[in-house]
Image (cartoon, helix red, strand yellow):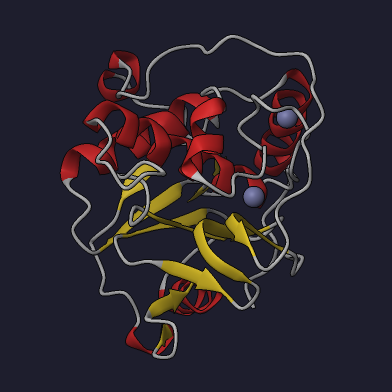
Amino acid sequence: MSRKTSKGTGSKLPTPPGQARPAAVRTAPGPAEPPREARDSKPPEAEHGGAKFHLGLVEMGRIGEFAVRVVAANIQAMIGIPVDILPSMEIPPDAFQHHRQQYDAGLVIKHLKEMVDVQQGRILGLVTADLCSPILTYVYGEAEVGGTVAVVSTFRLSQNEDGSPTTKERYYERLAKVALHEVAHTFVLYHCDDPRCLMRFSPKVATLDQIVLAFCDRCEFMLRENVFQLYRRPPEPRR
Ligand SMILES: [Zn+2]
Ligand SMILES: [Zn+2]
């Protein structure tokens, strides 16, 4: 049962995004690099009658092993679910929008849903191509709220607003932030007004850089609840 609301991180067309209200701010917990414990220890297995609840990471385009590991480690550490790195795939050619020279994020999600055995878990597609949606000029990522599939693009994360290249560290941090944001949408988290929270809507990299690598207390609480509920709930029948 997935709701159809799509929640992207990207630039809204044609109106700029709503003003974020100042709110209580948390300090960042640490860097976006893979924490040692996330690499060295196995995350807890959640099982429903033998079916494991995991998130599968699918590389679509050459993201690079380190970047994929950064995303995997951050999801394991911050969302608290095991991550499997799946074999890479081609981005579906039919998602390409010739008039925009970009890929439609919704169509990539649709394709991943059809192609990948999602079971009770989640799939996150990591693409190098530029993504858009019918109402957004571009998106850094997209997911269905309460759905099973999310997609993230690295295309716009390695440059700053003025077109200058950003540092590797900043690039990995942005990638981790967008991935955590989109995966959290699949756990029924909506956009947040806290200007430092990972669930803030980010229309540009400058906004993304203001966010810390943490959920605000409210989003953190909801995420824990929803992940916990999903682990405890019996799996829904396959359709
Ligand atoms: Zn969003
Ligand atoms: Zn929040």
The foreground one among 40 and 108 is 108
Residue sitting at x 50%, y 11%: 29
Is there any visible trace of residue 48 in the rendered image?
no
Image height of 163 relative to 173, above or below: below
Query: Where does the N terminus fall, quadrant-wise?
Result: bottom right
Residue pictured at 36% horizontal, 41% vertical: 160
Q: Is residue 175 above or below residue 44?
A: below
Q: Residue 98: where, in percent of width, then height? A: 39, 90
- Give 217 or 25, whichever is nearer the viewer: 25
- Relative to residue 8, is residue 111 depicted above or below? below
Q: Position of residue 15 (x, y in %)?
A: 73, 62
Q: Position of residue 111 (x, y in %)?
A: 46, 79
Query: Is 55 or 215 nearer to us in this picture?
Result: 215
**What percent of the width, then of the height, locates residue 147?**
65, 60
Q: Is residue 42 visible?
A: yes
- Image quadrant containing the C terminus: bottom right
